[in-house]
Amino acid sequence: MTWEVLSIIGTIAFAISGAIVAMEEEYDILGVYILGIVTAFGGGAIRNLLIGVPVSALWEQGTLFIIALIAMTVVYLFPQKTLPHWKRWGNFFDALGLSAFAIQGALYAVKMNHPLSAVIVAAVLTGSGGGIVRDILAGRKPLVLHAEIYAVWAIVAGIAVGTKLASTPVELYILFFIVTLLRILSYTYHWKLPHRSLRNQAVDQS
């Protein structure tokens, strides 16, 4: 039951996130649906490729495709006055999708008896893969590579699931809440990982 709930939450959240990004970039209605579908299912496709599951398994999720289409349609038909708030809601739904899919990806790898390293990779790819593809198609820098702490929270989810710190339904829902909250806090308060830029150095040398 936990698996199905997380799949539904992640699919809805990322489908909405992709649709919002498409509308921010002024894509037409077909572009909105394509970007939403890619965001919702791209991470799962990448994960399946790397842990040995046929990509065709994605096409067996007919119910989730319908749910994603309904979610995107609802967002597309929202009143125009909600537009100024879409960026904030886009970040929120992205946080929900990251958390739900990271945990779901980790559970998938555990179910296949993969080692902890593979569980963490599955969590990161499932949680952030769709968002990476979405940002690339939208002509944006992928959030996972430069924005406030992002993939780290997927790693946290992978470690918690892979080491059995979270295994029961209650523990998994608590983990989902914690990872979502951490992602929201990281973009609200601009928490960032250390980074170095060569841009200023190059300007100084010139």
Image: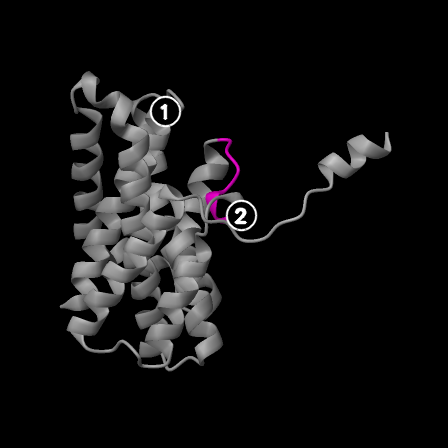
Q: CA distance from mark 2 to mark 1?
A: 20 Å
Q: Which residues are magenta?
A: 139-145
Amino acid at circle 2: Leu
Give the label on residue 110, or none: none
Query: Please, what secondary structure does the residue beneath circle 2 have?
Result: helix
Q: Position of residue 29 (x, y in %)?
A: 29, 24
Amino acid at circle 1: Glu
Q: Quadrant of residue 179?
A: bottom left
Q: Position of residue 204 (x, y in %)?
A: 81, 32
The reply, left or right, for residue 88 in relation to residue 135 is left
Q: Which residue is mark 2?
A: 145
The 10 Å Cα crowd at callout 2, few under 14, some 14 to 19, many 20 or more, is: few
Which quadrant: the N terminus?
bottom left
**Residue at x 37%, y 77% (from the top left corner):** 162
**175 relative to 143, above or below:** below
Q: Nearer the viewer, residue 58 or 197?
A: 197
Q: Which residue is mark 1?
A: 24
| Residue 51 visible in the picture | yes
**169 relative to 178, above or below:** below
The reply, left or right, for residue 62 in relation to residue 22 is left
**Residue at x 35%, y 61% (from the top left corner):** 102
Marks 2 and 1 in Cβ contact (< 8 Å)? no
| Residue 31 visible in the picture | no
The 10 Å Cα crowd at callout 1, few under 14, some 14 to 19, many 20 or more, is: some
Q: Mark 2 or mark 1: which comes first in sequence?
A: 1
